[in-house]
Image (cartoon, rainbow, N blue to C red):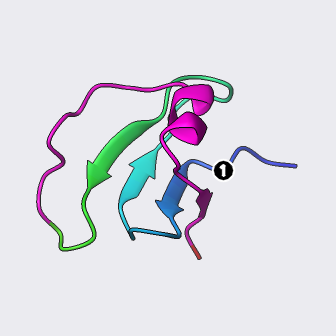
Amino acid sequence: MAHVRHLVDVRTGDEFDQPVPFGLVYPVCTADGSAPPSQRGRTWEHLVASDRELRQVS
């Protein structure tokens, strides 16, 4: 299975990018297209704990 780089939160519509497999996930933009409040990378564990549900962008 190939690495999925572009992700979206199914609950909020916010978009994320994971440039390196198993690496940090970075916010790209919010659902309305504006810049995210923080562009700091997060781990999958942190995002899941923050109630994010990321899926591949289709």
Side (left or right) of 57 relative to 22: left
Element under disc 1: loop
Q: Position of residue 34 (x, y in %)?
A: 11, 62
- Closer to the camera in the image, 36 or 21: 36
Side (left or right) of 11 relative to 28: right
Number of labels in the image equals 1
Q: Is 43 contained in the magenta span? A: yes
Within-10-Å neighbours for mark 1: few <14, some 14–19, many 20+: some
Residue visible at 24% across and 61% down in the picture: 30
Q: Position of residue 53 (x, y in %)?
A: 59, 56
Q: Main secondary structure of the magenta part?
A: loop
Q: Which residues are magenta?
A: 34-57
Picture layout, residue 15 above or below residue 20 = below
Q: Position of residue 2 (x, y in %)?
A: 79, 48
- For the C terminus, which image quadrant? bottom right
Residue visible at 33% across and 44% down in the picture: 27
Q: Is 38 contained in the magenta span? A: yes
Residue visible at 53% across and 70% down in the picture: 10
Which image quarter: residue 48?
Answer: top right
Which residue does the numbered mark 1 point to in the structure image?
4
Picture layout, residue 13 above or below residue 39 = below
Which amino acid, mark 1?
Answer: Val
- Closer to the camera in the image, 32 or 12: 12
Q: Residue furthest right?
A: 1
Q: Position of residue 36 (x, y in %)?
A: 18, 48
